[in-house]
Amino acid sequence: MGEQNILKVNPLPTLTWNHLMLNFANMPLEAASSKKADIPSEFKDIETGMGREFVSFVESHASYVRIIRAGKGEDLGVIKDEKAGIASEIILIEAGEDSRVTFYTHASDSVQDGQITRLVKVIAGPRAQVTVIQSQTVGNGCLVGDDFGAVVGDEAKVRLIQSELGGKAAFAGGCAALKGYKADFTEETIYFGDESRRLDFSYVTRHTGKKTTTSILANGALFGNADKVYRGSMDFIHGCSKSKGREAENVLLFSPTARNRSIPLILCDEEDVDGQHAASIGKINKDLMYYLQSRGLTENQARQLAVESRFNPVIDEIPDEAVREEIHASLERRMNLD
């Protein structure tokens, strides 16, 4: 067993709700013996959702570092992670002008214990399009950390998709610095908590360029004694006139003992902007359950259909049919446990 580190992760951009002790999360990680990763200077100062302590830990313990560069106008297609499921990895993506990159990584339920830490940083040049997909269905003994950071240039589009569906505890975050004119960032998360799983998320967008846009959407389902915290923050910085941001979270609660905390935060130092956030938290509508069961579905089947109808738009983005089937099988198994 390695030395245990307690890291402060998923910090809010500004301290608030201090009495609720939700300004950050404590994440326990075991140190490994890997040497410090050599990170190119252009990636070093990119802010991520999980924060500096997590980034420093991963950089000091990563067993795998990969740099992906797309030249001007180059389309790299879908790049699959070669080392998915290893203890710690760093992926650095630089997308040149008018280029396209999709990177995909999945940690499967074959990983039953230990810890997995994954860090992705992106530099998106003018009109580049970058998609990063992080998914995991790891076993009950595994702890997962999925972190992301991006700098988005003029008219560039960056998309982050995270599926956090397993592990005894899952921490995830993303941060996008929208520096370019009409820079755009989209983030979509699905999460599933049952038994005594802990889920902790933090997403931050920093708007500095003019006419920048953000869309952050999370869909989750909580069973058993699951404990979840979701932080969604939009920071409109002086000079980002005519920028827009939308942040929404939808949570289905299936247990009176599941604990849900949602923290929407808008920071604004610019008058001519449009920022909106919303949260929907509650049980499945009784009329919907009655309708589904009147069509021959069992209660468990009706619950599964309600959850997967919200999850499927994200699951369908995963470019691997076998993984999609694994996710559906995992959800079906866990939602049918009495």
Image (spheres, rainbow, N blue to C red):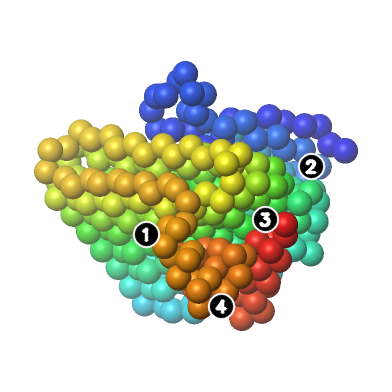
Q: Nearer the viewer, mark 4 or mark 1?
A: 4
**313 in relation to 116, above or below:** below
- Can you see residue 218? no
**Alpha carbon of mark 4 to alpha carbon of mark 1: how far?**
38 Å
**Alpha carbon of mark 1 to alpha carbon of mark 3: how far?**
23 Å
Quick one: SS at disc 3? Answer: loop
Residue position marked by numbered label 2 in the rendering: 32
At x 79%, y 49%, the residue is: 141
Q: How dense is the environment of label 1, judged by Cα within 10 Å: few (below 14), some, or many (20 and up)? A: many
Quick one: SS at disc 4? Answer: loop
Disc sitting over residue 166 in the figure: 3
Q: Earlier in the sequence, mark 1 or mark 3?
A: 3
Q: How dense is the environment of label 3, judged by Cα within 10 Å: few (below 14), some, or many (20 and up)? A: many
Left or right of 45 on screen, residue 64: right
**Alpha carbon of mark 3 to alpha carbon of mark 4: how far?**
30 Å
**Alpha carbon of mark 4 to alpha carbon of mark 2: how far?**
52 Å
Please tell me which residue lies in front, 24 or 178: 24
Quick one: SS at disc 1? Answer: strand
Q: Earlier in the sequence, mark 1 or mark 2?
A: 2
Left or right of 90 on screen, residue 19: left
Left or right of 224 on screen, residue 183: left
Quadrant of image for the N terminus: top right
Instruction: Name the outermost residue toward the left.
Output: 272
Residue position marked by numbered label 1 in the rendering: 186
**Quadrant of residue 215 within the rendered picture:** bottom left
Residue position marked by numbered label 4 in the rendering: 296
At x 42%, y 78%, the residue is: 74
At x 81%, y 42%, the residue is: 33
Q: Nearer the viewer, mark 3 or mark 4?
A: 4
